[in-house]
Image: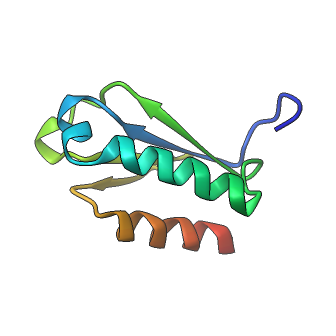
């Protein structure tokens, strides 16, 4: 984004200790690279958050403003959800 723009949606990936141990940091980096490659950063942005306080369900992410929560996810499940959002 070259100027201050507000994306349509934001994916918040928890990268707290439990989530990170279960691959969330890797997923965060993969999503950032994917969105940049696809030129989707104006529609969908990914941000890391320190902790969502849902460690029992790690890894956790949320897609806002849709209020979609994924827990104990696989990378494949996340990218499938992102593909659905691309079509909106």
**Left or right of residue 85, residue 1 in this image:** right
Quarter that holds the N terminus: top right
The quadrant where residue 82 appears: bottom right
Query: Which residue appears at 11% of the width and 41% of the height?
Result: 56
In terms of depth relative to the viewer, which is nearer, 64 or 55? 55
Query: Which residue appears at 26% of the width and 38% of the height?
Result: 20
Query: Which residue appears at 19% of the width and 40% of the height?
Result: 21
In terms of depth relative to the viewer, which is nearer, 63 or 35? 35
Query: Which residue appears at 30% of the width and 27% of the height?
Result: 51
**Left or right of residue 66, residue 42 in this image:** right
Q: Vertically, is 40 above or below 55?
A: below
Residue 13 placed where, x, y %?
A: 41, 41
Q: Please say which color scheme the image uses.
A: rainbow
The quadrant where residue 86 appears: bottom right
* Residue lying farthest to the left in this orientation: 56
**Left or right of residue 85, residue 48 in this image:** left
Residue 35 placed where, x, y %?
A: 65, 55
Quarter that holds the C terminus: bottom right
Residue 26 placed where, x, y %?
A: 38, 47
Residue 41 placed where, x, y %?
A: 72, 49
* Residue lying farthest to the right in this orientation: 3
Q: Is residue 66 visible?
A: no
**Looking at the image, how many numbered discs can be counted on the residues?**
0
Q: Is residue 31 visible?
A: yes
């Amino acid at each position: 984004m070259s100027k201050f723009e507000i994306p349509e949606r934001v994916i918040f990936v928890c990268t707290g200790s439990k989530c990170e141990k279960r691959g969330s940091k890797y997923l965060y980096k993969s999503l950032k690279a994917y969105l940049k490659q696809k030129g989707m950063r104006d529609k969908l942005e990914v941000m890391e958050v320190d902790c969502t306080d849902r460690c029992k369900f790690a890894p956790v992410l949320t897609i806002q403003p849709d209020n979609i929560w994924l827990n104990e996810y696989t990378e494949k499940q996340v990218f499938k959800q992102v593909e659905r959002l691309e079509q909106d």
